[in-house]
Image (cartoon, grey):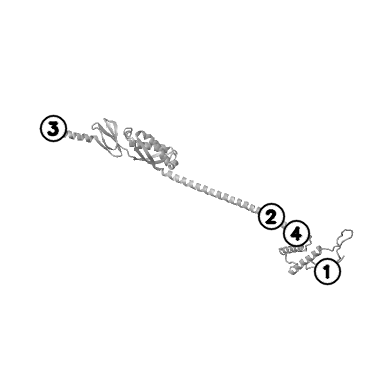
Amino acid sequence: MPFEGLDIVVIAIVVLIILVLFAGIKTVKQGYNYTVERFGRYTRTLQPGLSIIVPFLDRIGNKINMMEQVMDVPTQEVITRDNATVAVDGVTFFQILDAPKAAYEVNDLVNAVLNLTMTNIRTVMGSMDLDELLSKRDEINERILRVVDEAVSPWGLKITRIEIKDINPPADLVASMGRQMKAEREKRAQVLEAEGFKQSEILKAEGEKQAVILEAEAAKEAAFREAEARERQAEAEARATQVVSEAIAAGDGQAINYFVAQKYIEALGQIASAPNQKVIMLPLEATSLLGSIAGIGEISKDLFGNGGSGGGSGGGSTPPTRPAPKSKSKTLPAGFGSSNSSED
């Protein structure tokens, strides 16, 4: 019997040791931290993996999820600065960085973060106009995130993101906004149309101005060219007259023949081109014209021909005495009439 009692005691001790080992060995899952309490007081934090605690003295206080968590922010009504009521909801992303603070600094951590987020949404959005709420979501998200993250910092939390999902104004306000937007766009269209018309008129006026300037410059250039042409023509006529005069002075009868014939032909062309000219009583035949030129040549020979020369006594010179020509009659071409010369 003593041996049987001893066996029972050994077996009991072995079972107790096994129970103590199981009670002192703890396995922590990845993404979690466990807080250890001894007699109700926090002592340390168990990291993921296999850990050992003192059985019957230490116990696991809180199992803290260290992964990033998502929390929906329920819909709530917000009154904006311009007294518009809108329904707003959102979503919050947060992560626990310090397990002891998250476990012992605040009670009901998730509820605390939710209420803090909703309160700051009302605060931030209530300080803005409706137009700003609808057009500046990024600014709203950034302001709410900054305020909430600073408030939860003592709890060992990090707010990674806060997003406003929906902003729903009342139906009548949406209709008013639609009418306002339509009126604004019609106004903008009218302004753009007026600006386009104004720009068109300005460009048209500029074009007309440029055209007038170019036309004036063209007229100026044409007048300059015309004056230059007249000047050159006058110089040419003066030069021709000078050459003819020099030729006549030198006794060349052909020059005056050419000059007179040229003027004759020009006068004849002007008479023929006159709009009121119906009948021209002139020698238009070529033979008559040539005869006229020949007659002009004979006259020029008589006028500019070389006279006889004679010498006087006493070393003085007297003008040569022109011998008296015999009386004769010259028949000029038609149109010039006839001329009879008698001796002096």
Q: CA distance from mark 3 to mark 2?
A: 149 Å
Give the mark nearer the N terminus: 4 vs 3.
Answer: 3
Residue occupying the point 77% across, 67% down: 294
Circle 2 residue? 228
Question: In front here: 140 or 264?
Answer: 264
- Which mark identifies residue 25? none
| Mark 2 residue type | Glu
- Which mark identifies residue 329? 1
Give the mark nearer the N terminus: 4 vs 1.
Answer: 4
Q: CA distance from mark 2 to mark 4?
A: 22 Å
| Mark 3 residue type | Leu
Give the mark nearer the N terminus: 3 vs 2.
Answer: 3
Q: Position of residue 274 (x, y in %)?
A: 72, 63
Q: Position of residue 304 (x, y in %)?
A: 81, 62
**Helix, strand or loop at mark 2:** helix
Residue 337 placement: quadrant = bottom right
Circle 3 residue? 6
Callout 3 crowding tier (Cα within 10 Å): few <14, some 14–19, many ≥20? few
